[in-house]
Image (cartoon, grey):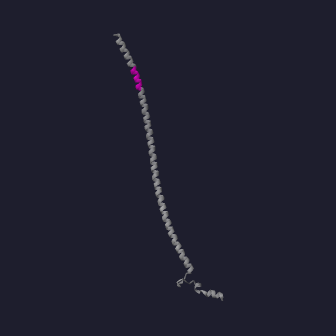
Amino acid sequence: MKASQAMSKDPLADAGLHFDELNKLRVLDPEVGQKTTDLKEECKEFVEKISQFQKIVGGLIELVDELAQEAETEKMKAIGARNLLKSVAKQREAQQQQLQALIAEKKMQLERYRIEYEALSKVEAEQNEFIDQFILQK
């Protein structure tokens, strides 16, 4: 009889019907209903956390993109500065070669002037000697 009492103790539960805390008839077991509600809340919190995570990741991606753009800008500036420096170095090298060529030209001109001076000095000495002899003969 005890077994039949246990079976007939809650015939509604056996039929899948239950009373909630407000004594309303429910098809769902209150424990399952509570778990469902808890799961719903956990899902809602999870979705909120995922949304916050997406916002944070979005902000991080924006920041990384900005940093990448700044790095690219600085890279271009550095390349430009390096190219300018190379250009200036080439200009200086060309200028140095021009100045060396000018120095060589001036040295050759100086040598020509020195030779001409020596020749003119020799002519002057000869003419002075001729004048001296001419004066002495008179």
Question: Quick check: is 39 in the magenta stretch?
Answer: no
Position in image of residue 9 (x %, y %) = 61, 87
Question: Quick check: is 114 in the magenta stretch?
Answer: yes
Q: Is residue 129 above or below residue 100?
A: above
Front position in the image: 130 or 136: 136
Q: Is residue 17 above or below residue 102?
A: below
Q: Which residues are magenta?
A: 112-121
Q: Total number of numbered labels?
A: 0
The residue positioned 45% from the left and 44% from the top of the image is 85
Main secondary structure along the magenta-highlighted residues:
helix
Q: Is residue 118 left or right of residue 26?
A: left
Q: Dividing the image into 4 quarters, which one contains the N terminus? A: bottom right
Q: Residue most toward the front?
A: 21
Q: Residue most toward the top?
A: 138
Position in image of residue 2 (x %, y %) = 65, 88
Front position in the image: 17 or 22: 22
